[in-house]
Amino acid sequence: MSFGLTALGSARGHRVRVEEAALSYTRDLRKLASWGYRSFHRADPDTGLVTLSVSAAEAALERGGLAAEDVDLIVVGITDIAEYLYWDVAAAIQGRLGARNAETVLLNHACASGVMAFDVVGGKFATHPAYSRALIVAANRVCEPYWNRMESNTSIGSDGAAAAVAVRGATRNRWLCTETITDGRFADIMRLEVGGAAAPWTGNSGGPQPVGDPVQRMKAFFRDDTRAMLDFAELGVTRTVQVLERACGRAGVTPSAVKRVFHLNDNLTALTGLAAALGIPLSRTNADIAVDAGHFGSADQLLALEAQLGTGEIASGDIIALTSMGSGMHWSCTLLEI
C-alpha cells in the first residue's frame, strides 16, 4: 500500500516560559533544570482536545487544497482523557469539520497513538479501494485535575494538535511501514484506581485522584525492586531501538540510512541516551524542538516533521523515523521517505 503526506497543519496552546510557571507545578527546580526544557504550550481553560484537533485539521486541509467533504477517512490518536466520557472524539472531530463522507477511527494508545495511526491508514486503504484521502490527527490536551504537567511524567506536558493529509499514491513524504511492539506486562503502571467501571466515582470518592510521581508509580508497581525498575528503564530504550530496526527490516533499508529520528518530546537526558543507543548524534533527533516546545503527547512526531520540512533540513529522498512509546506498553516506529 502506497500513500504519502501532502500537507500538514497544527494548533498549539500559548507558549509559556518554564521558569515563569515552574513553581505553579513543582518545587523540584533542580530536576526541572536537568530536563532542559525552555518553554511549553498551555491552552486556555475553555479550549479542549476537539477544538485543537479541528484547528489543526482545517489548517492541513487548506494547505492541501482539499475540502472536508473530500476526506474518506479520519484517524485520530489521543493521549489524555477527552472532554467527556461516553464520547467518541473522532466522530466529534468529523462532525465539527463537516467531513460527512469520512469514516472515523479513534486510537487511545497514549503517546504512541500518532505514530500507530499510519498503520491504520495503510490498512484501511488496503481494504477500502475507494478510499483515497485520509486525515491523521494527533492531539494532546493535559487534563490538569489528573495530570501535573511537571510532576506526573519525566517531561513537561504541552497542549496541541497536529494533522496530516494522507493521499493514496502520493510520492511526497511516502509511508514505508509502521512497526509496533506491545508488552502488556506493564499495562497497570499508569492505571488510576478510581473513576472507571470497576470503581466509579461516588459522592465519597473525594474528588479526582491525580496520576502520581513516576518514581513512586514505579516503586509501587515493581514493589520497591530497584533492579526491576532499572531494567524497565533500559527496556524503554532497547525496545525503541528494536522497533526501529524491525521497521527498517520491513522497508528494506538499513538503520544507518535513517537521516532523522523524531521521538516523543522527552527530556534532554532521555533523548541524549536514546541517540547514543541508536548510534546517532543528538542533532539528528528532535531534541532542539522538544526542549523549546514541551511534550505534546501523541502529536510530537507530526509537529517535528512539520517544523523540519519548513526549514529545509530534510530533503527529498531522506528516510525519517517517527518513534514513540506509550503506556500499555507500546513502542512504535513509522518510516517515511521524504
Image: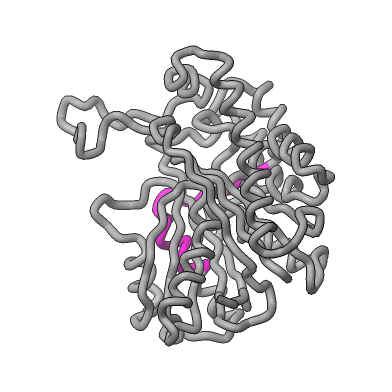
Q: Which residues are magenta?
A: 39-56
Residue 323 horizontal side relative to residue 319, left or right: left
**Residue 55 colored in magenta in the image:** yes
- Image quadrant in which the N terminus is located: bottom right
Residue 58 horizontal side relative to residue 233, left or right: left
Q: Position of residue 174 (x, y in %)?
A: 66, 73
| Picture mark count | 0
Q: Identify which residue is drawn at 59% across, 48% down.
A: 324
Residue 257 horizontal side relative to residue 221, left or right: right
- Judge whether 45 appears above or below 169 on screen: above
User: Based on the displayed image, in which of its 4 quarters is residue 62 positioned?
Assistant: bottom right
Q: Position of residue 120 (x, y in %)?
A: 46, 65
Q: Identify which residue is drawn at 69% across, 58% down.
A: 248
- Judge whether 76 appears above or below 174 on screen: above
Foreground pick, 234 / 8: 234
Foreground pick, 250 / 278: 250
Q: Identify which residue is drawn at 79% across, 38% down.
A: 276
Is residue 16 visible in this depiction of the protein?
A: no
Residue 207 horizontal side relative to residue 318, left or right: left
Q: How is the image coloured?
A: one colour
